[in-house]
Amino acid sequence: IYVMLTDILLITKIKSGDIQSFKEVFDTYYAPLLIYSTCIVGDSDEAEEIVEQLFYTIWKNHKELPLLRSLHAYLYGAVRNQSLQYLSHKNVQQTFAKKTKDGNESDTHEIDPQKQMELNELESLVNATIDELPERRRTIFRLHRFEGVKYDDIASQLQLSVKTVEAEMTKALKTMREQIGIYYHS
């Protein structure tokens, strides 16, 4: 219970803009999170980028930081999710590169530049839309859609009710449909 109260106090101070409290959290967690992310992604440079981005995002959005019972669990969960997302993205890139290479070797036709441009635009739109979602909604969306985490597991991990997770996913999907609908109708 002492750790929980300490975490709540630190988060409250960070929310109010106390740079010393943020520095304390950074100094305490940076190195262990870097090791943790490196174990997941297998690349210390990428792990460093992931952890630094997490702390940047926390400070940038410090006023909206939720009051957490466990700062430790939140930080490790966030690094885990971002590390897995990096691996997923890397896997997609490698698969695409392999298919493109295999396609070029077995097929004399080039990829239609117009279709490729449209795919790139659509992918950019999807990524931009996801990035514009509120942080909690974005996290829930990514956990469920990209990592296949079930609603009840997300609820447990983020200390939310399953109904809240369902509502956030519904809102995220509605936003995605609206933005992609605009793309197709333009």
Image (cartoon, grey):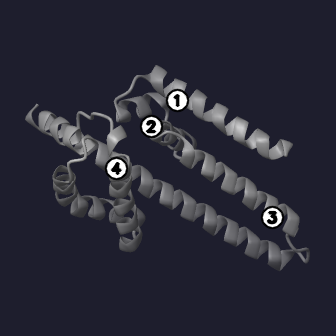
Q: Nearer the viewer, mark 3 or mark 2?
A: 2
Using the image as rendered, state which of residue 56 and residue 170 is in the foreground: 56
The mark that comes first in sequence, 3 or 2, is: 3
Q: Secondary structure at mark 4?
A: helix
The residue shown at (57%, 42%) is 145
Q: Position of residue 69 (x, y in %)?
A: 23, 33
The residue shown at (66%, 39%) is 176
Q: Nearer the viewer, mark 4 or mark 1?
A: 4
Q: Which mark is residue 168?
A: 1
The mark that comes first in sequence, 3 or 4, is: 4
Whole-Å distance between the Cαs marked 2 and 1? Answer: 8 Å
Residue furthest to the left in view is 2
Whole-Å distance between the Cαs marked 4 and 2? Answer: 12 Å
The mark that comes first in sequence, 4 or 2, is: 4
Residue 59 higher or lower than 30, as above or below = above
Q: Which mark is residue 116?
A: 3
Mark 2, residue position: 136
